[in-house]
């Protein structure tokens, strides 16, 4: 069936670009108008994807795209649609060319007699081992709609935790940048206006005033050098953090840092526990579930500590005992896993551990920011007050000499 590319205005007034599959131009136009779109342009044959090409612009779909795809596919399958028909509906609904192409690849694979998980393997870098193994286990048990709903819940929880941390850090970051700009602005533009007034004072100026004037002259004279040094330091730190040695050292320092160390630890363990618990609850073998869950951990120190689990499981040992010997994990982690092993509900206990740690992470981030924000404001106020007081003291000194 031919494809048609279009440009339209949605109900919210925003411009939309996309591709639709239809039997003819008139049917494509009618379908788009039924969605409440005001067509600006509709062309045939410009986006005839076969599913064999690379993703558009080499950019994979975002996490939000995958979450939306999983949620919509679960709803359609739950409604009783066959898999190929459900994928066809999603293709008709797609507005982003890169997502349309991915869906076309999956539909072509399913129509070729392959399982959905086999089609997902072709895009493993987009979906990941966890997602693919969940779908594979769902196909084996015949519960694909139910498992997709669990995947949606997992993806939403992961996104909520990640977004809460990122959004919480935005305001302090902006505040820090504004504070630095304010201080540089005071030293680079405000203080130099008084240099003429203080030019002939010399040692008669108060020490605070001389210090501020000296700092202002340094900023004014070497501004571009400071910018270059800061930029160079930023590039150096970024390259260092990207190297294997630098990344390992950075991750170790993060775990040892006050307040931040506990947040990082619980955030990473939460990801591991949620992934392993979800996989185990879906029937994935323990060794495979643990290996996939370890891959989701980004902190190298914690990942290395978790690396003792696969050999221990192969040897028939308990996970709780293996983790206890590392000395890395808290008693809560050890005890909850131990209870899960004793009761035969390891998957449920891991999910409960993830839920508890998610709550800890969010409350710890809020508590840390409650301390950080006033500290930044107070620091900026003290520095600016120091600058203003030093100028006022200089002015008073000039008046005293004039008298």
Image: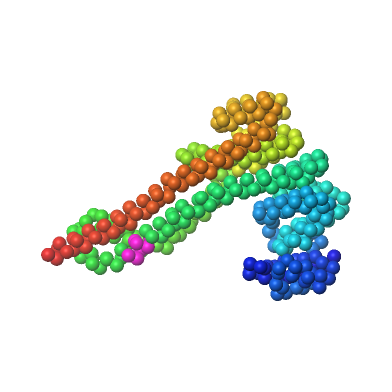
Res 320 → quadrant: top right
Front one among 57 and 237? 57
> Count of labels shown?
0
Residue at point 68% right, 31% down?
A: 346
Q: Is residue 191 left or right of residue 295?
A: left
Q: Is residue 93 above or below residue 337?
A: below
Q: How far across and how far down the image is residue 336, in percent?
A: 61, 30
**Residue 46, visible in the rendered structure:** no
Q: How far across and how far down the image is residue 233, in percent?
A: 48, 53
Q: Is residue 129 left or right of residue 261?
A: right
Work out which quarter of the rendered image holds the N terminus and state it: bottom right
Res 46 → quadrant: bottom right
Whether the magenta-drawn stretch holds residue 188 is answered as: yes
Q: How far across and how far down the image is residue 328, in percent?
A: 56, 32
Q: How far across and how far down the image is residue 217, in percent?
A: 32, 62
Q: Is residue 272 above or below residue 190?
A: above
Q: Is residue 403 left or right of residue 366?
A: left
Q: Magenta region: which residues?
A: 184-190
Residue farthest toward the right in the current orientation of the protein: 113
Front one among 228 and 32? 32
Whether the magenta-drawn stretch holds residue 41 is answered as: no
Residue at point 67% right, 25% down?
A: 342
Q: Main secondary structure of the magenta part?
A: helix
Residue at point 34% right, 54% down?
A: 381
């Amino acid at each position: 069936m031919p494809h048609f590319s279009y440009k339209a205005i949605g109900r919210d007034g925003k411009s939309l670009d996309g591709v639709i599959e239809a039997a003819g131009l008139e049917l494509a136009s009618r379908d788009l108008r039924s969605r409440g779109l005001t067509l600006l342009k509709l062309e045939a044959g410009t986006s005839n994807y076969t599913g064999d090409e690379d993703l558009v612009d080499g950019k994979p779909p975002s996490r939000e795209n995958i979450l939306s795809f999983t949620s919509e596919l679960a709803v359609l399958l739950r409604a009783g649609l066959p898999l190929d028909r459900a994928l066809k509906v999603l293709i008709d609904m797609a507005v982003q060319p890169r997502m349309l192409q991915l869906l076309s690849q999956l539909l072509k694979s399913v129509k070729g007699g392959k399982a959905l998980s086999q089609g997902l393997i072709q895009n493993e870098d987009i979906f990941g081992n966890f997602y693919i193994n969940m779908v594979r286990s769902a196909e084996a048990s015949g519960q694909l709609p139910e498992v997709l709903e669990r995947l949606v819940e997992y993806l939403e929880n992961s996104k909520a935790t990640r977004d809460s941390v990122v959004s919480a850090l935005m305001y302090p970051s902006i505040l820090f940048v504004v504070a630095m700009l304010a201080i540089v602005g005071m030293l680079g533009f405000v203080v130099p206006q008084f240099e003429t007034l203080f030019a002939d004072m010399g040692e008669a100026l108060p020490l605070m005033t001389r210090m501020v004037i000296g700092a202002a002259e340094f900023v004014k004279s070497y501004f571009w050098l400071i910018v270059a040094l800061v930029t160079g330091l930023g590039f150096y730190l970024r390259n260092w953090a990207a190297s294997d040695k630098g990344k390992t050292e950075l991750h170790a320092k993060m775990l040892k840092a006050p307040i931040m160390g506990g947040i990082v630890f619980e955030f990473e363990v939460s990801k591991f526990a949620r992934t392993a618990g979800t996989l185990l609850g879906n029937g994935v073998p323990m060794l495979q579930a643990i290996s996939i869950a370890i891959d989701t951990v980004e902190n190298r120190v914690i990942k290395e500590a978790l690396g003792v689990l696969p050999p221990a499981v192969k040897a028939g040992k308990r996970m709780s005992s293996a983790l206890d010997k590392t000395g890395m994990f808290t008693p809560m982690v050890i005890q909850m896993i131990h209870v899960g092993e004793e009761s035969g509900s390891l998957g449920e206990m891991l999910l409960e551990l993830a839920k508890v740690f998610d709550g800890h992470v969010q409350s710890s981030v809020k508590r840390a920011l409650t301390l950080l924000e006033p500290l930044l404001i107070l620091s900026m106020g003290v520095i600016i007050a120091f600058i203003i007081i030093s100028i006022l003291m200089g002015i008073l000194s000039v008046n005293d000499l004039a008298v």
